Amino acid sequence: MDDKLMLMIPGPTPVPERVLSALAKHPIGHRSGDFSKIMAQVIADLKWLHQTQNDVLILTASGTGAMEAGIINFLSSGDRVLVGCNGKFGERWADLCDTFGLRTERITASWGQPLDPDAFRRALEADTQKQIKAVVITHSETSTGVLNDLETINRYVKDHGEALIIVDAVTSLGATNVPVDEWGLDVVGSGSQKGFMIPPGLGFVCVSAKAWKAYETAKLPRFYLDLGKYRKDAAKNTTPFTPPVNLIFALQAALEMMKAEGLDQIFGRHLRLRNAARAAIEALGVPLLVRDAAAASPAITAVEPGHVDSEKVRSVLRQKYDIAMAGGQDHFKGKIFRIGHLGFVSDRDILSAIAALESVLQDLEYPNLPVGAGVTAAAKVIMQW
Amino acid sequence: MDDKLMLMIPGPTPVPERVLSALAKHPIGHRSGDFSKIMAQVIADLKWLHQTQNDVLILTASGTGAMEAGIINFLSSGDRVLVGCNGKFGERWADLCDTFGLRTERITASWGQPLDPDAFRRALEADTQKQIKAVVITHSETSTGVLNDLETINRYVKDHGEALIIVDAVTSLGATNVPVDEWGLDVVGSGSQKGFMIPPGLGFVCVSAKAWKAYETAKLPRFYLDLGKYRKDAAKNTTPFTPPVNLIFALQAALEMMKAEGLDQIFGRHLRLRNAARAAIEALGVPLLVRDAAAASPAITAVEPGHVDSEKVRSVLRQKYDIAMAGGQDHFKGKIFRIGHLGFVSDRDILSAIAALESVLQDLEYPNLPVGAGVTAAAKVIMQW
């Protein structure tokens, strides 16, 4: 049916009506007092979401733009950096570091496996010269649905003392606990079309005092992504370059909704959705890509259907039920599909998605499918929560 | 009155209801076939607007991000560049070039005066070694309302043969003729919240074959703003990084409206609005910042009220009539105000703005004000068009 699309992809995620209405307001001048009032509220609410007193800066950029800003502002050509690579996004940040002339060392795991914190510990402990200037970690690896053990890796970074921890929290912020101040995270990048429940177009970078100290001596050239400019203007509730005014209206509305729901409730809901999705897929006898629940992202569940082409599953789901799920990326294309349960997603949505998925797998003659078991298992998780 | 704001600033500009409705649609997946169809149409329509067969690339960025991309993708550290500086934006591009280690030579004129094409001719003719790699020109200088003589300067760049012409067309594209192919403009940057009639958040960069050749050997590091990535994906009607899906919906709607109006009609309307604004201000005996009509931007008219504080004019206009005009920037703050007549602005709007402005100047006891003469003069321009 036309206009009946249901997004179950890890971004853009569904947007509440209240947020769409805010988005559709007539723009106002970005140098006006009225806009500064909105900025003041939005900045305060972003700090609440990040559980921090650090600066949270707003960029007109995708998540990649935010992560580039989070890297280039604090480093100089030739700096040694460790980058965790166990999926498309970790690999992207390593490529980005290469592009800017950093001495990039990839600490890898297979796609679908979590990064091994011990590998970071060993590299950091061996660095007695304190040459490692940053460790870049993708918290929730969107391409596979792995949640890396940021807390433990960060502890080893803290033991090292010199290196900054730079976090891609694009699909973890607003879905799972990212306590910036409690953990002492130096740089945290994210994007609007994820846990924030608004359309894409805004990037966010949260910056610690330690990172600002590194900024002072960092030499990579920066202008549009120069976070110092954003910091200076954020103090006056404005931005150095024209902000996407309507997306800021939407952000304001979405953050109000998030505050009304509460952080613990938001994290609990995402965990419940993840558990329901995983229980359903397991009950159907279809393999999950991430076997270990402890390493499974609360934002995305990747499924490896094996017996049937994952792209076929997606296209039938789209055609018959107007549900969009994500495919695999790069060498995972055709091998996995990904259920996004991130942002404005409810228990009802996950039941709908699982019910439709069961029907599609049956259509595609998935062998020995216990029809009904998926919905039953998901509902059980929800009921017993 | 609440929600009664009328934008007469040079961005964000007013947005048509049709475009706001498109903006407020539920997002769809940016890797879907449906989105690629929209991208295909939008890319074709952008080429129409740019009067070009060159690539037109869409970035999630402000106009400054688009201009940074338009500069760093085609140059290497140490390259010699000429930058026209007669306002805040020209100066910004010169600072940007400095930041990236280019050998920047500023060709200046006072704020409010047009750049002298002969100064460019002399510098280019003297460069027999062909060391000048680019000439950066702000076509319509938003900070002052000067329209620089791009056509003539570009002719001298063509005579030089080697240098690229890089144009800030942020407030000229969609307001006045920028015939990219006819003039052979190499790089043209612009932003969505101007002639495009949509909210801020999108940047556009139009790139010629000659510029792509320079891209191949240009060495400044680039990742998020790497236009080669955008070019490769635009050929498949997609983007390398998540695009602001809802702003693309809005762009599609706005470009359809622009095509329905027609380029000549759009340019004619902006010229008429400019002439009406200038005739009104002159009839009121208030000084225009840009004295020479030939150097006056069809997008912005700056007024230098002299006898009264320009910030006072703006605040009374805002309070009494809910009209937002722009102030002066940097050393022009308090000295000028700027009437934006760019994008979705009609004859009726300029009459309203002039009528309100007359009333405010009277309120502020502007000396010897011929009340009524402004509206009469503006209406005469419109009637006789």
Image: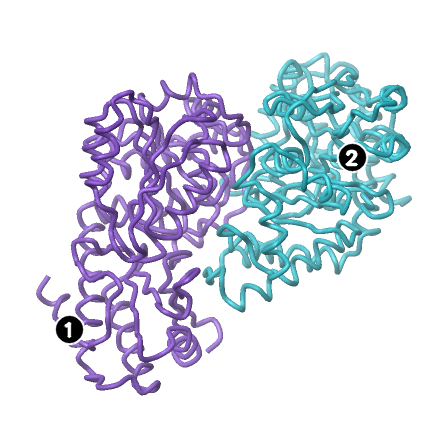
Chain colours: A purple, B cyan
Q: Is the C terminus of chain B in the top left, top right, bottom left or bottom right quadrant?
A: top right
Residue picked out by circle 1: A377
Residue B313 in view: no
Please give the chain letter of the residue carrying mark 1: A
Q: Is residue A338 above or below residue B376?
A: below
Q: What secondary structure is found at the residue carrying circle 1?
A: helix
- Name the image quarter holding residue A361: bottom left
Residue A372 in view: yes
Residue at 15% across, 76% down: A376
Residue B194 screen position, x and y as percent: 66, 41
Residue A365 screen position, x and y as percent: 31, 87
Residue at 26% across, 33% down: A123
Residue picked out by circle 2: B165
Q: Are marks 1 and 2 on the same chain?
A: no
Residue type at mark 2? Ile
In this image, A309 relative to A347: left or right? right
Alpha carbon distance from label 1 to label 2: 63 Å
Q: Is residue B35 above or below residue B275?
A: below
- Name the image quarter holding residue A381: bottom left
In this image, B365 relative to A130: left or right? right
Residue B173 screen position, x and y as percent: 74, 43
Q: Is residue B19 above or below residue A96?
A: below
